[in-house]
Amino acid sequence: MSMTRPQLLPSAVAHTEWVLSALDGKGLSLEERMHAAVTVFGFVRGVAVNIEPEVEQRRHTGITGDEWVDQQAPALLDIAASRRFPIFSQAAGTELDMGLDTLFEFGLARMLDGIGEWISGRSTLTERRTGM
């Protein structure tokens, strides 16, 4: 799906309608609601674009993403030992769930939190201006 030349497909319009409906009545202009819908879509697409290559790599190599990460442990330990990247190196030897599902859920929640704060901030500003 293109963000600049969107195809008017029912499933794409259904997603946009869902976001617009969730934001309806929140004091946002139609343009602001459309911007939020496209922003959420961009995030979803950004994560989803990695699903097919991951499936293809698993089919091609026969190993899972977790197995691949395990195979990279020596390289990570070498990077950590260099002391060039002290903060990143904290990941060496730890169990971090960096799977697409977890990344998607975390990112979407933070994005929606941010949109919620943006709306809340606008409401607070409007209340201050109107003395409510």
Image (spheres, helix red, strand yellow):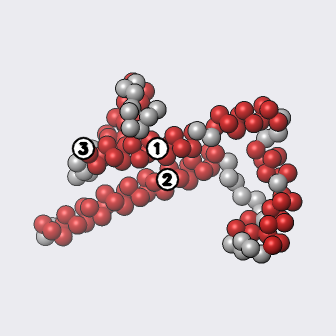
Q: Which corner quadrant of the image does residue 59 belong to?
A: top right
The residue positioned 83% from the left and 65% from the top of the image is: 77
The residue positioned 62% from the left and 49% from the top of the image is: 102
Q: Earlier in the sequence, mark 3 or mark 1?
A: 3
Which label lies toward us, 3 or 1?
A: 1
The residue positioned 76% from the left and 59% from the top of the image is: 95
117, 2: nearer the viewer: 2
Check disc 2 and give the amino acid type. Answer: Ala
Mark yes or no: residue 69 visible.
yes
Check disc 3 and give the amino acid type. Answer: Leu
The residue positioned 84% from the left and 66% from the top of the image is: 78
Few, some or many C-alpha atoms within 10 Å of disc 3 (few <14, some 14-19, many ≥20)? few
Q: Which corner quadrant of the image does residue 113 belong to?
A: bottom left
Q: Earlier in the sequence, mark 3 or mark 2?
A: 3
Q: Position of residue 35 (x, y in %)?
A: 34, 46
Q: For mark 1, what is the residue?
A: 42
Q: Position of residue 123 (x, y in %)?
A: 25, 61
**What numbered label is drawn on residue 23?**
none
Side of 132 where 64 appears, left or right: right
Q: For mark 2, what is the residue?
A: 109
Give the CA distance from mark 2 to mark 1: 14 Å
Q: Earlier in the sequence, mark 2 or mark 1?
A: 1
Few, some or many C-alpha atoms within 10 Å of disc 1 (few <14, some 14-19, many ≥20)? some
Q: Are marks 2 and 1 in contact (CB under 8 Å)?
A: no
Looking at the rendered structure, the secondary structure element under dot 3 is helix
Which label lies toward us, 2 or 1?
A: 1
Mark yes or no: residue 93 visible.
no
**What numbered label is drawn on residue 30?**
3
Looking at the rendered structure, the secondary structure element under dot 1 is helix
Check disc 1 and give the amino acid type. Answer: Gly
